[in-house]
Image: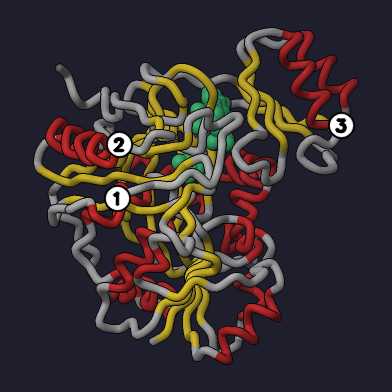
Amino acid sequence: MNVGIIGSGGREHAICYLLNKSKKVSKIFCFPGNAGTNLIAQNVNLNTDNFPELERYCLRKDIKMLVVGPEKPLVNGIVDHFKGKSIRVFGPDKISSKLEGSKIFTKKICQKKNIPTSKFKICENLTETIDYLKNSYFPIVIKADGLASGKGVYICKNFNEAKVAAKEIFNGKFGFAEQILIEEFLDGEEMSYFIVTDGKNYKFFGSAQDHKRVGEGDTGKNTGGMGCYSPSRLLNDALELKIKKKIIEPTLNAINEHGGVYKGFLYIGLMIKNDEPFLIEFNVRMGDPECQTILPTLNTDLMNIFISCCDGTLNQSKINFSKFKSICIVLCSKGYPEKFDNNIEIEDLEQLKLLENQNIFHAGTLKTKTGIISNGGRVLSFVSTSDDFLKCRNEAINLIKKLNWKNGYFRADIGNKVIKI
Ligand code: AMP
Ligand code: GLY
């Protein structure tokens, strides 16, 4: 079967790499892909926001399945566009995607289903927000309701910071804002838990801890993710049961009650305190770099998983992961997440020899006539799996050092919570 993958990051290269190993996959098309996917798939430049155009291309190339990496096409209803047509789309429909597309929608589900999450208040305008903030405890969290490329969350230490955040949101920094979400600040340790579902049944799809801050020791600005380790040190059977019974199952039931069909990955972002899970957010896709970290430990044909989710037969298939630990370190452009230069050549990348337990997934890379150049903040994901986290990290760092890219920056402390040296 010919398959299309939407997206251009490390997550999509990892998905492409695994699909390329499946006997069920003939040819892969990436919309638009990167220099890494270009080696094993055909990269296609096409406006994927234009669903009819994408559909015409798929029909021409006999693409029978689309896998959606990022959230935007899902929130915009790509699954609904292809409903009843000959092209399957792996991902949740528009109603289900509101779990990421509207933080207020999710909070209302939490309220209705008694899902553990931070206390919250929805405000309709700046005056109401300021009045509420005057009687609040700090720190407090202010959030824009809709998609904001990870930038719509403000952790505010005091009243003034909160006021600035609220003003920015109501002034339209993330698009027209009818409402704002104010949340109690949760402390604890964060964990990401993943499932895959066919709308009726769901299965575990890994756990991880991301490192969002740019600097070592979790300092500096927030990024899309500087690295990740899997499995999370926090996960145990009792906690997992609570996550399923108190968070996942009530949420999937609520989606059904709203008339949605959730097929695809669900990313459950949690704060864990005293072995109790609190929902921070849902994402309706795999995480990046969590996907690059988890997929190399998957022992099941990924294409079979996608097919069984689309066809509603997930209960008949088994998903197996190896017992290995995994670490992913992101090599980014110096200056990221602020100003950085693009178009810097990455020499010798194709000459780097990898062992079977090692992967390099591309993100912000571009193939030119003369070689590979950078074209993004997060450029390459170095992944190593083994029975020991320190070994994983050392291998990933050694590969980065061998590459010796002059414009690169990475955190050498990924996995510090599970590596004590
Ligand atoms: P979100 O986009 O909702 O995941 O928020 C981004 C990040 O902000 C999360 O990964 C947390 O680190 C932090 N965060 C969001 N909400 C809260 C909260 N209520 N309490 C503490 N930290 C939060
Ligand atoms: N690594 C965080 C995310 O994918 O949203």
Q: Is mark 3 within 8 Å of ligand 1?
A: no
Q: Residue flagged by tag 1: what amino acid is it?
A: Asp
User: How far across and how far down the image is residue 56, in percent?
Assistant: 64, 86
What secondary structure is marked by label 1?
A: loop
Asked if residue 367 can be seen in this view, the reply is yes
User: x, y percentage for residue 164?
Assistant: 78, 18
Q: Amino acid at mark 2?
A: Asn
The residue under label 1 is 348
Q: Are marks 1 and 2 in contact (CB under 8 Å)?
A: yes
The residue under label 3 is which amino acid type?
Answer: Asn
Label 2 C-beta lies within 8 Å of the nearest ligand 2 atom:
no
Measuring from the top left, give residue 373's x and y in whole percent: 46, 51
Q: Residue furthest left?
A: 387
Q: Which residue is disc 3 drawn over?
A: 171
Q: Residue at x 57, y 90 (%)?
A: 59
Q: CA distance from mark 1 to mark 2?
A: 9 Å
Circle 3 Cα neighbour tier, 10 Å, few/some/many (<14 / 14–19 / ≥20): few
- At a point 43% along the width and 69% down the height, the residue shown is 198
Residue assigned mark 2: 404
